[in-house]
Image (cartoon, rainbow, N blue to C red):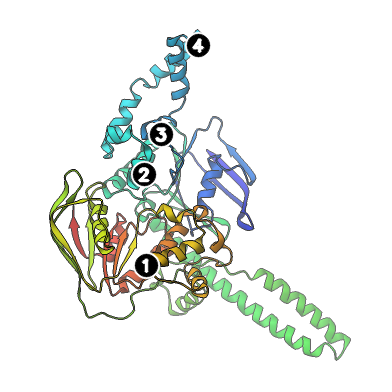
């Protein structure tokens, strides 16, 4: 066993994430950790990776275990380069490099340590490791000039590639990977999955990417502060989850019946207890029974994927819909608009020093779905940024070499971006919502704001006061949805909208978009999401 965690408990402020939680990872296992946003999945990774020491419980590790943990955010890299960032995770690289350099320059005179460093460098191929890393990064479309330049210049997808390469060279026994495919293009994701399949090391990956979940050997779900284990991949999880959840629904329904029966006795006893001592004794007995049943009747979190729900009987389906877990309530376009053409791109060539693509033409009408497909760097984001800039009457960062973008006068765009604007990160959630509405020259009353936060699964009284920087990736994604639908848009532009969302929220988003009456332009590398939305494919 690589790692065995027992009786873990973790609280953040007044919020308890989990109590008395236990999990283990065996050598060679590929385990996925799933769960609702904000439940503590990334916290578990940080605890297992020794980045978070503020918890209760015990963790046993295999002797000499080497663990490496990925990062979702890269806000503290300063002036470091992607190459130096990766090399920092190569065991003893900088330590022995410093010994070798110091000895050769005369600042260190310990011959034994110098000899040890030389032997380690030679045995592990460290003399060529920088060249090998640069070559691997080049395979992932990160050329040497980017690999040796400031980390901050990389796009979200490029940062994911750097994390993947860091994993490859870390020589770890246990890989703790957080949302690895967010921002990756379809070729990069295929390479990641191929690499995952080839691994013999242990892996714990936090992901809701259904393509990745199809390639793991076990799924563990963090739900209601506890861990539930499901052997097999995503398809096996869906079957087991539907069966387990159906049983839980029936059990909870029976508990509610017992509670209702016990309440009737208590109400009757309350009326009768003054008549005699015998009735007083009965009432006290019934009240104790009622209090015990009430304490035991705790509503679990219920979620069954939509396809599995369709296979349930009517009675079970009705009960499930009555008790199922609360999900985001996504606002969609109100009413049909007569204007059909929302946007027209004609013979467009965009780029910077030179065109990224040439002579692109397409039209988006009310009800159309348009899928922009291409590798990272092909110009997908450049295209949508050009549309947004023209909509906002701003000068785009890119150059228009030829062609044009025509927008309808009645156009209202709602945008979902890959990465949240840094201007929001210094604000509280409440302030961020106000700011989003102000950016649209709109206002939002406090009562409406609280209602909106609640619709998107935030606790208005608690979460509204939290800084955006303290929110999980999934919580930030739900804020993005609030921002996108604020102005009742008739055209949505979605750049990787399923990143960070949990499985129920992804399904809710898919359902909302399927019934949305406006036009949609989307960029995604989630094959399940693409299959659901479909539409015209524009390939760059």
The residue sitting at 78% across, 86% down in the picture is: 270
> Of 58 and 523, which appears nearest the observer?
523
Q: Residues within 10 Å of mark 4 (few under 14, many from 20)?
A: some
Disc 1 marks which residue? Answer: 440
Q: Secondary structure at mark 1?
A: loop
Circle 1/circle 4 CB separation < 8 Å:
no
Q: Residue at x 44, y 59 (%)?
A: 502
Please name whichever residue, 13 or 384, is drawn nearer the observer in this view of the structure. Answer: 384
Of marks 1 and 2, the one in the foreground: 1
**Is residue 459 something that shows in the picture?**
yes
| C-alpha span from label 1 to label 4 | 62 Å
Q: Is residue 228 left or right of residue 185?
A: right
Task: Say whether residue 1 is visible.
Answer: no
For residue 353, the mark is: none
Q: Is residue 424 above or below residue 88?
A: below
Q: Label 2 near label 1: C-beta < 8 Å?
A: no
Q: Identify the residue position indicated by label 3 in the image.
A: 80
Residue at the spot of label 4:
108
The correct choice, above or below, for 425 with respect to 317 in the image is above
Q: Quote the CA–CA distance across marks 4 and 2.
A: 38 Å
List the single residue furthest toward the right: 277
Q: Position of residue 251 (x, y in %)?
A: 57, 71
Question: What's the distance in space between the residues labelled 3 and 1, CA to CA?
Answer: 37 Å
Q: Earlier in the sequence, mark 1 or mark 4?
A: 4
Residue annotated with mark 2: 160
- Dot 3 or dot 2: first in sequence order is 3
Q: Is residue 219 left or right of residue 187?
A: right
Provide residue 174's location: percent of width, then percent of height.
47, 38
Identified at 54% across, 53% down, the residue is 40
Q: Nearer the viewer, mark 3 or mark 1?
A: 1
Q: Tell me the SS state at disc 3.
A: loop
Q: Earlier in the sequence, mark 4 or mark 3?
A: 3
């Amino acid at each position: 066993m690589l790692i065995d965690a027992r009786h873990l408990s973790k609280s953040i402020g007044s919020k308890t994430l989990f109590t008395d939680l236990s999990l283990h990872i065996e050598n060679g296992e590929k385990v996925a950790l799933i769960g609702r946003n904000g439940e503590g999945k990334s916290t578990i990774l940080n605890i297992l990776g020794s980045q978070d020491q503020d918890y209760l419980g015990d963790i046993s590790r295999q002797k000499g275990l080497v663990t490496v943990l990925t990062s979702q955010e890269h806000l503290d890299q300063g002036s470091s380069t992607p190459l130096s960032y990766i090399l920092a995770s190569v065991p003893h690289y900088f330590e022995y490099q410093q010994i070798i350099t110091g000895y050769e320059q005369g600042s260190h005179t310990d011959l034994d340590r110098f000899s040890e460093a030389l032997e380690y460098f030679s045995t592990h191929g460290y003399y060529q490791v920088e060249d090998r890393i640069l070559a691997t990064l080049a395979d992932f479309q990160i050329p040497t000039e980017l690999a040796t330049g400031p980390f901050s210049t990389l796009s979200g997808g490029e940062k994911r590639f750097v994390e993947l390469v860091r994993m490859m060279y870390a020589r770890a026994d246990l890989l703790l990977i957080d949302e690895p495919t967010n921002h990756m293009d379809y070729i990069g994701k295929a390479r990641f999955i191929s690499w995952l399949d080839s691994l013999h090391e242990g892996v714990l990956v936090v992901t809701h990417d259904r393509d990745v979940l199809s390639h793991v050997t076990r799924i563990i779900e963090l739900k209601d502060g506890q861990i539930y284990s499901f052997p097999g991949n995503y398809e096996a999880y869906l079957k087991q989850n539907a069966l387990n959840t159906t049983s839980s629904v029936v059990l909870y329904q029976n508990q509610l019946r017992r509670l209702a029966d016990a309440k009737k006795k208590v109400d009757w006893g309350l009326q009768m207890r003054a008549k005699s001592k015998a009735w007083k004794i009965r009432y006290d007995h019934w009240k104790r029974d009622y209090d015990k049943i009430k304490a035991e009747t705790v509503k679990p979190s219920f979620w069954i994927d939509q396809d599995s729900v369709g296979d349930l009987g009517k009675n079970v389906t009705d009960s499930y819909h009555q008790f199922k877990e609360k999900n985001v309530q996504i606002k969609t376009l109100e009413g049909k608009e007569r204007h059909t053409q929302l946007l027209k791109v004609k013979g467009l060539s965009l780029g910077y020093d030179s065109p990224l693509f040439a002579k692109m033409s397409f039209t988006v009408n009310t009800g159309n779905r348009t899928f922009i497909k291409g590798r990272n760097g092909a110009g997908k984001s450049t295209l949508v940024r050009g549309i947004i800039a023209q909509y906002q009457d701003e000068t785009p960062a890119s150059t228009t070499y030829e062609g044009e973008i025509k927008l309808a006068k009645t156009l209202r765009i709602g945008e979902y971006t890959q990465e949240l604007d840094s201007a929001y990160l210094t604000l509280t959630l409440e302030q961020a919502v106000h700011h989003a509405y102000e950016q649209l020259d709109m206002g939002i009353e406090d009562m409406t704001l609280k209602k909106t936060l609640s619709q998107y699964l935030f606790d208005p009284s608690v979460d509204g006061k939290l800084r955006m920087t303290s929110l999980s990736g999934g919580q930030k994604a739900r804020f993005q949805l609030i921002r996108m639908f604020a102005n009742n848009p008739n055209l949505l532009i979605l750049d990787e909208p399923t990143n960070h969302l949990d499985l129920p929220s992804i399904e809710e988003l898919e359902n909302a978009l399927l019934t949305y009456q406006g036009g949609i332009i989307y960029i995604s590398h989630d094959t399940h999401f693409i299959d659901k939305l479909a539409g015209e494919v524009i390939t760059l």
